[in-house]
Image (cartoon, rainbow, N blue to C red):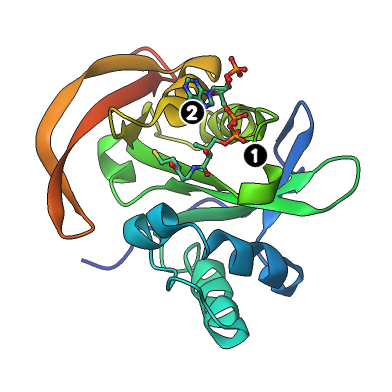
Amino acid sequence: MPPRPLPPWPTTPPAHGGIRLREVDDRDVAMVLELSTDPYIAQTGTLSPDATEAHARAWIERQRGRHGEGVGYSFAMVDATTGDAVGHCGLWLAELGEGRATAGYVVAPSARGHGRAADALTALTAFGATVPGLHRIALYIEPWNAPSIRTAERAGYEREGLLRSYHRIGGQRRDMLLYATVLHSP
Ligand SMILES: CC(C)(COP(=O)(O)OP(=O)(O)OC[C@H]1O[C@@H](n2cnc3c(N)ncnc32)[C@H](O)[C@@H]1OP(=O)(O)O)[C@@H](O)C(=O)NCCC(=O)NCCS
């Protein structure tokens, strides 16, 4: 099926607390290289572990294609004061026809410890509420991932259950907690 066209890129950058979201671009190479040093990020996404600059640029290009492909919105998380890129988050809309999205977030190791993912997820969720037809955003989180669980809760997501053996990560089936927020009542 051809991808469902997504609404245009937001004219006002989504923002909350100390974080602003913008389209990923070549300014993000250093941040992407740092993300690739986290083995868990390499296991869960499409970024090569210990990426080279060429890998990072190719990853950025893929992210920039996501909107046009109808896959979703791929955002750089930027420190609202300094403008420095500190991480990445995405609102993934392959199931927009069913009113559903998923979201994901990563913060560069050197930028962690300031609740930036919660700010980014709050901004991303408010942006999601402006997407016509979107009713629900889900997060899949491994039970050991306390910082991610706390991020979800701080952004207002509720735990809906444990999905046993749900995702394959690092060559193993993993249980995932399902967290979600409902944007609009039916
Ligand atoms: C998850 C992630 C994005 C959070 O980044 P961050 O915003 O810098 O997170 P913080 O370090 O500020 O921690 C967020 C919260 O978790 C808490 N926390 C952190 N480590 C914790 C631990 N080991 N046990 C319990 N709570 C912990 C913090 O105290 C903070 O809570 P608070 O807001 O109530 O103070 C980051 O750890 C990351 O990129 N991890 C790798 C990728 C990943 O797991 N992404 C999510 C996939 S579902």
Closer to the chain start, of discs 2 and 1, is 1
Return the x and y of residue 136 as percentages of the image width and height. Answer: 36, 27
- The residue wearing badge 1 is 112
Return the x and y of residue 96 as percentages of the image width and height. Answer: 33, 43
Q: Which residue is drawn at 54% across and 20% down?
A: 155
Position of 61 relative to 44 (above/below): below
Q: Residues within 10 Å of mark 2 (few under 14, many from 20)?
A: some
Position of 6 relative to 165 (above/below): below
Label 2: state its secondary structure: helix
Query: Does the Cβ of the disc 2 residue fall within 8 Å of ligand 1?
Result: yes
Query: Does the Cβ of the disc 1 residue fall within 8 Å of ligand 1?
Result: yes
Q: Decide which of 23, 186 is in the foreground and name it.
A: 23
Label 1: state its secondary structure: loop
Position of 103 relative to 164 (above/below): below
Q: Decide which of 71, 159 is in the foreground and name it.
A: 159
Return the x and y of residue 23 as percentages of the image width and height. Answer: 67, 59
Q: How far apart are marks 2 and 1 (CA)?
A: 10 Å
Position of 133 relative to 106 (above/below): above
Tell me if I can see residue 10 in this picture. Answer: no
Q: Which residue is drawn at 39% across and 67% down?
A: 46
- The residue wearing badge 2 is 147
Q: How crowded is mark 1: few (under 14 residues within 10 Å), some or many (20 or more)?
A: some
Q: Which mark is residue 128?
A: none
Tell me, yes or no, whether the two marked residues, 2 and 1, touch with CB atoms within 8 Å: yes
| Amino acid tagged 2 | Pro
Return the x and y of residue 8 as percentages of the image width and height. Answer: 60, 54
| Amino acid tagged 1 | Arg
In the rendered image, the quadrant that contains the N terminus is bottom left
Tell me if I can see residue 132 in this picture. Answer: yes
